[in-house]
């Protein structure tokens, strides 16, 4: 018995492809060239017997977790727990943000993984202009191809930075993509038609402000320092294996879990904050300011920050608020909401430093307020 | 912990989403048009996360064995400026910035435990629930004609027996009194106080995307001195007919005068879309 396993494992170790097989994918390129002997070292015969059981153990653990989760849910379908109205509504509101965003986040994570692993550099960077201004302009239109909601854009932007996009470019994409995408534009036209120039100003304003912020960030002496140290380290680590094309499916699965670990906690915290603010702040107080040319702009920007709504549908939401808002206020809501809100800040904090987000939020808020007030005064 | 929080949260949310969809309660949180998308992405995401976790578990098991059998020449705890140190950090989602700050690291771990516990309780233990009417009470009635106008065009001349509160509200807003006068109405909703002693609104929450944007829509019902017998936010069903407002108030020219009116418990599906 011992004999056979020893022989088998040695045979495995000698097969070069198999020696690489067990390594985490991203270590492979480095290790196999720099430390070839070590790869073989870890394939000692004594390891062999337990290795054969490993896939089963992993499967059993996963199946166990899944059964427990499903069991807990099925066992407590209408359990007698009843909360006070406010606590109940906090839970319902937070969950609705989570459940609504989750599919978009999953889609964003999957697209980000595909872009990182399967899109060759020559496609990706060849189509982008060299000139910084044009390049950011093109990137802000990327949302047309990838009509993912803003929460799905965060994992995608992270993937693009890992692929070598600069920080200002990623920020331009993040701010512009939720507005400059076909679904958002269509729903805005459905909601408002072409009257009052709301659609035009939303699209144009979103494009200009996103690119202005992008340009501003290029003025920073060291744009990479705008990223969190942890994300910078992750980028540096990934830089090694960009051109490693082996076992992409397995690496992709690993990337998906790693990205979920980065993004999902932020999504849950952001959603809980959005739910909490909603039960704490009376919406009527904000909506009541609707007609005032100055206050309505600020009120709707605050509302956009608080409700943390998907850009694809926010146009219908403003319509349904039931108050006649000034066009400037509506444009401010429709431009500010997709760029910055509670949930987005929590998500973006996975990637950018708090200071960066404060500056970007302030610049975007000032620019949007100027846009909204300008439209109201020009009428 | 840092590596497992994503897969765990994802599985909790995926199980919750699929269970809600299977029991027909997903619509308590999001508009039904997203059901298919949510279910498909939950399944794909669940499969991807399980696959990723599988490889992660196998790698951990292998590393554990490697650590037992390893010789002193490659110590994993040694985070010297070695190329694989960066890799290990990356994999653990713990960067060099955090390793230098153990207290922050500890509080982050506590935070992660809290997030997972909160997600478990909220998504898998608490019973699913609609927004309570109490919250709805602080949201203004959707009265903007624009909000309700779009679908109203298809309503004229169709079968009115299936009309919801929202359909009647749309018709009333867009077509005015002449569109509804004399029509028989059969609806259910909750009582929304709009500040009138004799006219109460029978309303439902209208959801455009998810429960966050829920906004009451309602139609006026003539019920003299209604506060005496009924409580705001309680659910009712009624049959009646649109007529000129008998109280003569100019603010609400047309109201439903009910012929049958009864209290009910909150329906399983309290929203309109």
Image (cartoon, rainbow, N blue to C red):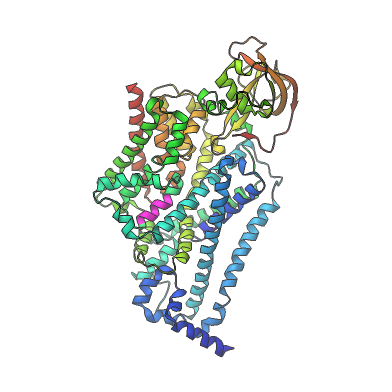
In the rendered image of this protein, does residue A32 appear above or below residue A238?
below
Classify the position of the C terminus of chain A by image quarter. top left
In the rendered image of this protein, does residue A137 appear above or below residue B202?
below
In the rendered image of this protein, does residue A10 appear above or below residue A270?
below
Residue placed farthest to the bottom in the image? A3
For the magenta stretch, what is the residue range?
A: A154-161
> Is A209 included in the stretch rendered in magenta?
no
Classify the position of the N terminus of chain A by image quarter. bottom right
Picture coordinates of residue B101 (x, y %)? 40, 59
Magenta stretch secondary structure, dominant: helix
Q: Quadrant of residue A160?
A: bottom left
Q: Is residue B21 visible?
A: yes
Asked whether, in this view, residue B253 is left or right of residue B111, the answer is: right
Q: Nearer the viewer, residue A327 or A287?
A: A327
Picture coordinates of residue A330 (x, y %)? 42, 29
In the rendered image of this protein, does residue B56 appear above or below residue B124?
below
Picture coordinates of residue B61 (x, y %)? 53, 72
Picture coordinates of residue B153 (x, y %)? 56, 25
């Amino acid at each position: 018995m011992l004999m056979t396993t020893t022989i088998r494992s040695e045979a495995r170790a000698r097969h070069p492809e198999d020696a690489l097989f067990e390594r985490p994918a991203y270590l492979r390129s480095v290790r196999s060239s720099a430390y070839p002997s070590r790869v073989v070292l870890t394939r000692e015969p004594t390891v062999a017997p337990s290795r054969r059981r490993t896939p089963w153990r992993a499967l059993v653990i996963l199946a166990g977790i899944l059964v427990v989760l499903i069991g807990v849910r099925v066992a407590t379908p209408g359990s007698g727990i009843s909360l006070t109205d406010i606590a109940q509504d906090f839970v319902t509101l937070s969950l609705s943000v989570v459940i609504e965003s989750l599919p978009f986040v999953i889609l964003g994570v999957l697209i980000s993984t595909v872009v990182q692993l399967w899109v060759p550099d020559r496609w990706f960077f060849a189509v982008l202009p060299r000139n910084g201004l044009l390049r950011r302009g093109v990137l802000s239109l990327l949302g047309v191809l990838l009509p993912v909601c803003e929460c799905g854009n965060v994992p995608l932007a992270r993937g693009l930075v890992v692929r070598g996009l600069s920080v200002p470019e990623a920020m331009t994409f993040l701010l512009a993509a939720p507005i400059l995408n076909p679904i958002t534009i269509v729903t805005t036209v459905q909601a408002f038609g072409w009257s009052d120039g709301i659609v035009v100003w939303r699209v144009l304003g979103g494009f200009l402000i996103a690119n202005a912020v992008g340009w501003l960030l290029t003025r920073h002496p060291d744009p990479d320092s705008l990223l969190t140290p942890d994300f910078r380290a992750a980028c540096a680590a990934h830089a090694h294996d960009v051109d490693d094309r082996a076992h992409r499916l397995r690496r992709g699965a690993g990337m998906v879990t790693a990205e979920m670990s980065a993004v999902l906690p932020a999504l849950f915290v952001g959603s809980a904050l959005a739910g909490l603010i909603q039960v704490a702040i009376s919406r009527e107080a904000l909506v009541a300011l609707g007609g005032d040319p100055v206050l309505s702009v600020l009120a709707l920007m605050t509302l956009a920050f608080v409700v943390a709504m998907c850009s694809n549908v926010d146009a219908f939401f403003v319509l349904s608020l039931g108050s006649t808002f000034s066009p400037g206020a509506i444009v401010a809501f429709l431009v500010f909401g997709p760029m910055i809100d509670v949930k987005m800040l929590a998500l973006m904090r996975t990637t950018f430093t708090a200071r960066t987000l404060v500056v970007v939020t302030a610049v975007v808020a000032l620019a949007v307020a100027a846009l909204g007030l300008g439209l109201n005064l020009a009428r | 912990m840092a590596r497992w929080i994503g897969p765990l949260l994802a599985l909790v949310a995926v199980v919750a989403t699929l269970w809600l969809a299977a029991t027909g309660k997903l619509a308590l949180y999001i508009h039904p048009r997203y059901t298919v998308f949510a279910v498909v992405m939950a399944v794909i995401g669940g499969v991807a996360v399980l696959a990723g976790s599988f490889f992660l578990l196998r790698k951990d098991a292998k590393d554990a064995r490697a650590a037992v059998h390893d010789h002193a020449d490659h110590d994993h705890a040694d985070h010297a400026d070695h190329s694989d140190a960066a890799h290990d950090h990356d994999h653990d989602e713990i960067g060099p910035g955090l390793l230098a700050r153990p207290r922050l690291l500890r509080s982050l771990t506590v935070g992660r435990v809290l997030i997972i516990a909160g997600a478990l309780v909220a998504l898998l233990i608490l019973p699913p629930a609609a927004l309570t009417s109490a919250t709805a009470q602080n949201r203004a009635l959707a009265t903007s004609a624009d909000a309700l106008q779009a679908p109203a065009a298809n309503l004229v001349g169709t079968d009115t027996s299936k009309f919801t509160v929202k359909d009647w509200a749309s018709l009333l807003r867009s077509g005015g009194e002449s569109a509804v006068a004399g029509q028989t109405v059969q609806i259910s909703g909750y009582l929304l106080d709009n500040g009138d002693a004799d006219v109460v609104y029978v309303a439902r929450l209208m959801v455009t995307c998810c429960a966050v944007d829920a906004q009451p829509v309602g139609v006026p019902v003539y019920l003299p001195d209604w506060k005496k017998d009924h409580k705001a936010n309680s659910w009712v069903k009624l049959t009646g007919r649109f007529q000129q407002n008998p109280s003569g108030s100019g603010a609400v020219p047309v109201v439903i005068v009910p012929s049958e009116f009864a209290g009910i418990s909150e329906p399983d599906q309290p929203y309109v879309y």
